[in-house]
Amino acid sequence: VLTQSPATLSLSPGERATLSCRASQSVDTYLAWYQQKPGQAPRLLIYDASKRASGIPARFSGSGSGTDFTLAISSLEPEDFAVYYCQQRTNWLTFGGGTKVEIK
Amino acid sequence: QAQLQESGPGLVKPSETLSLTCSVSGDSIGIYYWNWIRQPPGKRPEWIGFVYFSGDTYYNPSLESRVTMSVDASKNQFSLNLSSVTAADTAIYYCARRLVASNFAFDIWGPGIMVTVSS
């Protein structure tokens, strides 16, 4: 089970965002992060806990291993306000409940 | 860059079988793992399973008894059948490609198709 916190993060453009994802058991570094905007499919940002997917800006970074993971957005751009999901692979694949990053 | 497009009925009756197809363009269906993922409105995504271009499959244990996936390489398509559907199967259904560099992340997604289960 993946638990994301906080459920909602209210920030202003230019601020730093820090999102958390906690696994109920170790997933090593088998963790990915996605961004989803209304009416769109999720977009892969980070895989293997810290590797940026192709075309993803450097302001997005991932860290962690085992059970505790973090997605950081160094300076929020207007297009970064969205819902973020983490995803893990153990015996099968599951997603966290999401964190909504909204404009303050 | 590969592009994916889901197709199929948007409305399915309870107890019937939901059947969807994903068409792949811009790349060959070969060497990749092709996945189905669904997302009830306002909820988290749920992975359904994958089919490899060879035809090998692996399903989410919670859905395994009702799921069948297949691939048609001649048409560059793969398909999902979900039997005995109920209202709980109402969701946006996405097809997605697994990233080659990872064995679990999905780098390319279709736009999704909303499927409602209702009589």
Image (cartoon, coloured by chain):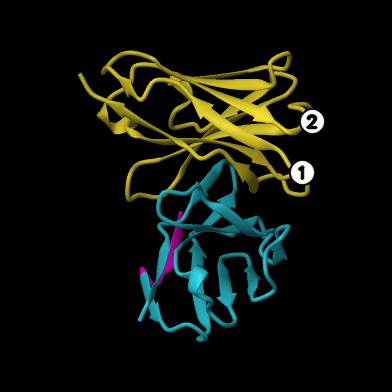
Which residue is painted at 61% across and 22% down in the image? Answer: B78
Helix, strand or loop at disc 2? loop
Whether the magenta-drawn stretch holds residue A23 is answered as no
Helix, strand or loop at disc 1? loop
The mark nearer the N terminus, 2 or 1, is 2
**A58 left or right, relative to A70:** right
Q: Where is residue A68 in the image (x, y as percent from the top left)?
A: 56, 69
Q: Label 2: which residue? A: B31
Up-down: is B64 above or below B33? above
Which residue is painted at 63% across and 24% down in the image? Answer: B57
**B116 left or right, relative to A34:** left
Q: Where is residue B39 in the image (x, y as percent from the top left)?
A: 41, 42
Q: Are marks 2 and 1 in contact (CB under 8 Å)?
A: yes
Q: The cyan chain is which one?
A: A
Chain bearing mark 1: B
Magenta residue span? A1-7
Amino acid type assigned to the residue bearing label 2 in the image: Ile
Crowding near pointer 2: few (<14 within 10 Å), some, many (20+)? few
Which residue is painted at 73% across and 48% down in the image? Answer: B102
The shade of chain B is yellow
Q: Position of residue B100 (x, y in %)?
A: 77, 43
